[in-house]
Image (spheres, coloured by chain):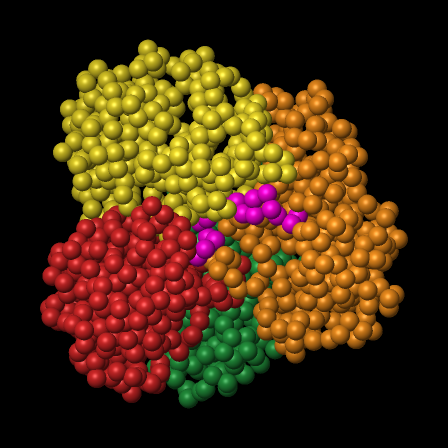
Chain colours: A yellow, B orange, C green, D red
Amino acid sequence: MIKAAIFGASGYTGQELTRLLLGHPAVELTAITSRRYAGVPVTDVFPAYYGLTKLKYLNAKPSEIAGLCDVVFLALPHGVSMAIAPEFIAAGKKVIDLSADYRLRDIVTYEKWYAKHVSPELIKEAVYGIPELYRNKIKGASLIANPGCYPTSIILALAPALQSKLVDVKTIIADSASGVSGAGRDPQIGSLFCEVDGGFKAYKVGKHRHTPEIEQELNSLAGTSFPVTFTPHLLPVKRGILSTIYATLQQDIGTAELCRVYSQFYAREKFVRVCPEGVFPNISSVCGSNCCDIAATVDTRTKRLIVVSAIDNLVKGAAGQAVQNMNIVCGLEEHAGLKTAPLYP
Amino acid sequence: MIKAAIFGASGYTGQELTRLLLGHPAVELTAITSRRYAGVPVTDVFPAYYGLTKLKYLNAKPSEIAGLCDVVFLALPHGVSMAIAPEFIAAGKKVIDLSADYRLRDIVTYEKWYAKHVSPELIKEAVYGIPELYRNKIKGASLIANPGCYPTSIILALAPALQSKLVDVKTIIADSASGVSGAGRDPQIGSLFCEVDGGFKAYKVGKHRHTPEIEQELNSLAGTSFPVTFTPHLLPVKRGILSTIYATLQQDIGTAELCRVYSQFYAREKFVRVCPEGVFPNISSVCGSNCCDIAATVDTRTKRLIVVSAIDNLVKGAAGQAVQNMNIVCGLEEHAGLKTAPLYP
Amino acid sequence: MIKAAIFGASGYTGQELTRLLLGHPAVELTAITSRRYAGVPVTDVFPAYYGLTKLKYLNAKPSEIAGLCDVVFLALPHGVSMAIAPEFIAAGKKVIDLSADYRLRDIVTYEKWYAKHVSPELIKEAVYGIPELYRNKIKGASLIANPGCYPTSIILALAPALQSKLVDVKTIIADSASGVSGAGRDPQIGSLFCEVDGGFKAYKVGKHRHTPEIEQELNSLAGTSFPVTFTPHLLPVKRGILSTIYATLQQDIGTAELCRVYSQFYAREKFVRVCPEGVFPNISSVCGSNCCDIAATVDTRTKRLIVVSAIDNLVKGAAGQAVQNMNIVCGLEEHAGLKTAPLYP
Amino acid sequence: MIKAAIFGASGYTGQELTRLLLGHPAVELTAITSRRYAGVPVTDVFPAYYGLTKLKYLNAKPSEIAGLCDVVFLALPHGVSMAIAPEFIAAGKKVIDLSADYRLRDIVTYEKWYAKHVSPELIKEAVYGIPELYRNKIKGASLIANPGCYPTSIILALAPALQSKLVDVKTIIADSASGVSGAGRDPQIGSLFCEVDGGFKAYKVGKHRHTPEIEQELNSLAGTSFPVTFTPHLLPVKRGILSTIYATLQQDIGTAELCRVYSQFYAREKFVRVCPEGVFPNISSVCGSNCCDIAATVDTRTKRLIVVSAIDNLVKGAAGQAVQNMNIVCGLEEHAGLKTAPLYP
């Protein structure tokens, strides 16, 4: 059994990691930390797990946690992971970092969008953790930069088109919408039920921190440099991200052929489900699961590619992808602990 | 008092017209029809209005209804209005048609997207009913083609930019999301609570019937011909449409100047509220009201215009705009009966 | 025009008062206070009202506000009103207090459930503000103790049965459920969208502060003393309270006769709508309105009375009833500013 | 591997059975029937399961299905199972019936509330399938009458109190609320998103068909005959039932002792979780799981027992309990296929 620990386990991502690891056949969850809830049983904070675990949150130092695990998940805010990851790496542990701290390869870009980096030397070691694209690199890694939720949905949606050079990359527009769990469990007015229910809005227009991450990855897949228009929206749901992406085609291709390109690209990927022609994904069909559903179509009237992808922001957008990365890094079956069907309705 | 009647009053648009007209200080609602609920009191179907009206739905012929009103609202499905409107016009009544039957000026386009037209001779008489743009034409009209909900949100959002020729019209992309009342009150699986709640999806991608209407109006405002990419989505809310529209700028303009262009364009319009720079609209802030909130910004990194607009699909997207048109056509104060504040939260 | 002010205007109740007073034909809203948002325009905090008001929140002392109004609404937390009301009373203003500070006539009870009372001398002056029951007392009052939301729904539901001595009062059980706006706009984990959506739970079982208020009023209506079982629940909606109340009948009465008792009791009340036999209320049918819908039935198999009532917790449960009380106290038409139809769907 | 089939698999209960059986380690789902979707792949109707199954709905006769399975689940409407079950029983198959057809032992009662029974001879063979109470009877059964959702939540909540004779059974009142999936997937106006969202209402007050089933079981546990007041409500959620049950105590017992009674009663039951004193269940904490969370408290002021229970209506209220029964009947580990943690948030 692999021993796993979660640092910063009391937010929604942390509790999702807890849920997945408690159900993982080859992993023993040995320690979870939270300063806010130090000493408190998990089931006091998340009664859903009553009877499934007796764990209590610890307020422990990295060195103490390192002694209890083989792999550690850092579910801390941006700017905090960077101070802690080095200790675990030095202790020879595998680290899956769910913050943005090691995602951006260019430190200037990171510091422009986030904060001063305190362990930039680890950036080049970190592997950007999208298994469907970087499986081999992940295998040999010790430090995984688990991707952001919006970026995951957009990168998986565009990878086939970029690899086949189907589109003029300068025309890419990503219009995304996410459920509220993406904002975290901190009490803030904007996340209150009465502020969200029945509402829908764009936010951080042209300013979202995921923008450089999206650009880094799309630029890498396309082999050229370009900016991307990315607009996030807040959906009145708990979980889910739908991204609708537009790009002008630079090849003459019809929807049927486009679907074949997508199906072939993801033919062996168990977690990416390419929809049949004419069928479009719904976030409700991936709820609670590590799947990413993608539909691609050609808008013949405007010669544009339109791709729609759906993920659960807490699973494939965070904790599920982290467990998938852990499976690869630890030499386990890649789908272990991630086989549960989505919960519908 | 103006006498008004509603033909086809038992769907969500019809009941919204009922609500607005019952509260209109200068209008007497004299007759409402519904074949399905003929003889049934409105309050049996919509208990919300108990105590506010004693009206019963009638199953009446146009000629009978014409005798009871000065102005009639046709809240019938597409393809049905066109058979009925001529009778009311011939009887000298003002007709506000909420279907698509008279919106498209080109009959070939109408018949391609909808059905065979049985009264095409009325198309040239019909005035497309967006008061903020066509107030003078509406004044003298007898037949108003009340615009579609999605088109209203997109046209109002782009009009200032098109008038000032700020964008390359070939790059326009309209990404919209609507609440479920837009789908009507017909029992269908796709509108069931369990199929909608917690979900979000794109539908009719590249195929939505509002596409030709959006193109007709944007082409007219721009003075040139071009297709538009329009993608609707289904939101897990009852009311509201948010449209996020993208277009590449062809002028060098910053956000502050852009906001000035928008504010000036709508300076005298009571129902269009241009958001302060940096503030973006939420459908929850226009719930139940005839307002359209618009925010415009420049994505400097990609030199794109991003405009976001929010309306209530049943009010400014249908019944409210219809009442606004009626006010103009009947020589009443334009805002009469439409002054109620949005309902928040 | 009556001049009105709102003290503590930035919570949901305060903004609902703002909405209602802005639309009141005989009232001028002259001042609204909020320490948290001092100097901030209302429309910055509640963009829904953009274009409807230019008011800014003030951080003002009672004496300053008293100079600006004839009637003041105190929308402050419990324990705060009691320190402020005396100043307004002394200045000769009418005071509508939306807290619990003057609702309980017995100071021992108040201090057991709430806090030490600092102006108990005003308690005997205060009139408990349910117009349908205490209209004449309200007319002559200077200080109105606006009732709690749950109590309003339960008292109106039981008044006819208690007046006709239909039930054994010792068997009364009130099972209620409220939307989240009742918890206020303070950021707390329990009010977060992700903690509420899709959920439903009982809370403060046997402990809710509204219990003594419910008992005081039901005891008064029944003319005898008895405790009541009251269980609140949290509904995943923004607005609305549904109360389902049970009591064993002590008279032989059928549902038809029971409905007649209820209809007669409320025959002249415009805001209380007694449902036809067999029809039961839904909170969605009173959304945004000052109505209270009530249905009463006899469960013949168990000889119990079951009464169900629906109100909007922010309107008839707080701000709407406060405005209704103000209308009476200020000699205005009782329904002024409260005539808007509910918003459905 | 046990071979299982589902008759009538295309409603919400049927698809939930499909989800659970597809994930069951010791069961092979061999056939699923649906007349409406005959020949259609499951994944066309429920895209959530794409990649998890290649099954298609069959329109098959019982005899054909009997040849394909060891155990069959009947997820058909009331009145239909009764015509089909006998064939499977005669063929030596285990039958888990999710309808009400075999739940009521008294045929007169069944026919009064439902319809004429066509296979009443099987009633005495059928075992009412609540494992926590009737495990030993279920072991030897061939025909399981899977309980109704509301009854399951109420029976489990009251069993400990009834066994210990803590309450005056004549005072029992069960106030329940259920998510909309309980109404099924048939398109009907009352289940439309716009009719449900933001709403809450009581329905079938004093008339719900689950009443005789609740009474049969509570009477059996109490060893005496009495009617029960049961009021269902419709919650604006997809899944979940919360029951709040009241009964006057006939013993002097405090909350701490009451919690001990409940904890002991369910000490060995993995699926029933008794909440710590002062903690109350939320339907969101059992979402997607076979758990039933129960809290019991004494309302000392009125000497009443108040018990609150939460289940997922599709899982412990239907499909999950059916699989649990199947496990027992087929000699499998009772918790097999039911170990997944609830999905939270």
Q: Is residue C318 left or right of residue D17?
A: right
Q: Is residue B62 left or right of residue C190?
A: right
Q: Of residues B180 and C76, which is closer to you in this image?
A: B180
Percent position of residue C299, x then y: 40, 80
Q: Is residue C41 visible?
A: no
Q: Eyeballing the image, is A243 above or below B53? A: above
Residue A137 falls in which quadrant of the image? top left
Residue under the image location 45 percent in, 25 percent down: A163
Residue under the image location 42 percent in, 71 percent down: C245
Q: Of residues A339 and C257, which is closer to you in this image?
A: A339
- Image quadrant in which the N terminus of chain A is located: top left
Q: Eyeballing the image, is C111 above or below A241? A: below
Q: Eyeballing the image, is C226 above or below C107? A: below
Q: Is residue B118 left or right of residue A262?
A: right
Start and end of the magenta stretch? B194-210
Q: Of residues A59 and B234, which is closer to you in this image?
A: B234
Residue D299 falls in which quadrant of the image? bottom left
Instruction: Please check the rendered image and state whether residue C193 is part of the magenta-colored stretch, yes or no.
Output: no
Percent position of residue D80, x then y: 33, 76
Number of callouts = 0
Q: Is residue D120 visible?
A: yes
Q: Characterize the magenta stretch by its predominant secondary structure.
A: loop
- Image quadrant in which the C terminus of chain A is located: bottom left
Instruction: Please check the rendered image and state whether residue B203 is part of the magenta-colored stretch, yes or no.
Output: yes
Q: Of residues C203 and C38, which is closer to you in this image?
A: C203
Percent position of residue D65, x then y: 26, 67
Percent position of residue D158, x then y: 23, 68
Residue under the image location 28 percent in, 29 percent down: A325
Residue under the image location 76 percent in, 65 percent down: B83
